């Protein structure tokens, strides 16, 4: 899904609803950082009314959020294809192609990397 414009509380709530409805036969757990959008009133209301569980990451710990590492990789792929005259539609098309073709979208490596930091945290080591 490619979203035009900013992610609002309504957009994020609708995304959460879609995920929880798509996986209605399983328990749904969202692991989120402390971004303002994750705590918007309408998102909080949806969480309270739903059968989903939320776990928040500690503040300032992007190492524990695998999607942050993928976003960094994704931005590098976009920058490699982007020109100074790239239009919004061309950018969306590039993003769609990258998301379809990117072989690193398998998140296993990003989760392995994150687990190293979890282990360090459990060992009370700084990271």
Image (cartoon, rainbow, N blue to C red):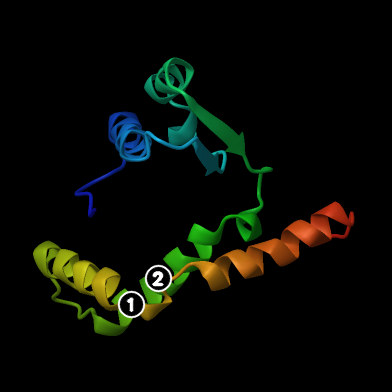
User: Which residue is tagged 1?
Assistant: 102
The numbered disc on residue 105 is 2
Say if 44 sits above or below 98 in the image. above
Splitting the image into 4 quarters, where does residue 41 fall?
A: top left
**Could you give the CA–CA distance between mark 1 and mark 2, rounded to whole angstroms?**
6 Å
Quadrant in which the C terminus is drawn: bottom right
Q: Residue furthest right?
A: 124
Residue drawn 89% across the image and 57% down it = 123
Say if 85 sits above or below 29 in the image. below
Q: Secondary structure at mark 2?
A: helix
- Horizontal and vertical percent position of residue 64: 64, 56
- Horizontal and vertical percent position of residue 30: 51, 39
The answer to whether the residue labelled 1 contacts the one labelled 2, judged by CB atoms less than 8 Å apart, is yes
Q: Residues within 10 Å of mark 2 (few under 14, many from 20)?
A: some
71 relative to 91 in the view: left or right: right
Q: Residue furthest bottom?
A: 80
Q: Secondary structure at mark 1?
A: loop
Q: In the depicted view, which residue is nearer to us: 124 or 20?
A: 20
Splitting the image into 4 quarters, where does residue 2 fall?
A: bottom left
119 relative to 27 in the view: left or right: right
- Horizontal and vertical percent position of residue 27: 49, 35
Splitting the image into 4 quarters, where does residue 13 fall?
A: top left
């Amino acid at each position: 899904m490619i979203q035009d414009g900013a992610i609002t509380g309504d957009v994020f709530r609708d995304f959460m609803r879609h995920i929880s409805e798509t996986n209605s036969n399983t328990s749904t757990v969202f692991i989120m950082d402390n971004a303002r959008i994750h705590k918007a009133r309408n998102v909080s209301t949806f969480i309270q009314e739903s059968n989903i569980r939320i776990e928040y990451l500690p503040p300032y710990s992007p190492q524990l959020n695998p999607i942050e590492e993928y976003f960094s990789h994704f931005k590098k792929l976009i920058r490699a294809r982007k020109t100074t005259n790239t239009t919004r539609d061309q950018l969306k098309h590039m993003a769609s192609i990258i998301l379809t073709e990117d072989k690193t979208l398998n998140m296993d490596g990003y989760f392995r990397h994150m687990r190293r930091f979890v282990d360090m945290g459990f060992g009370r080591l700084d990271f």
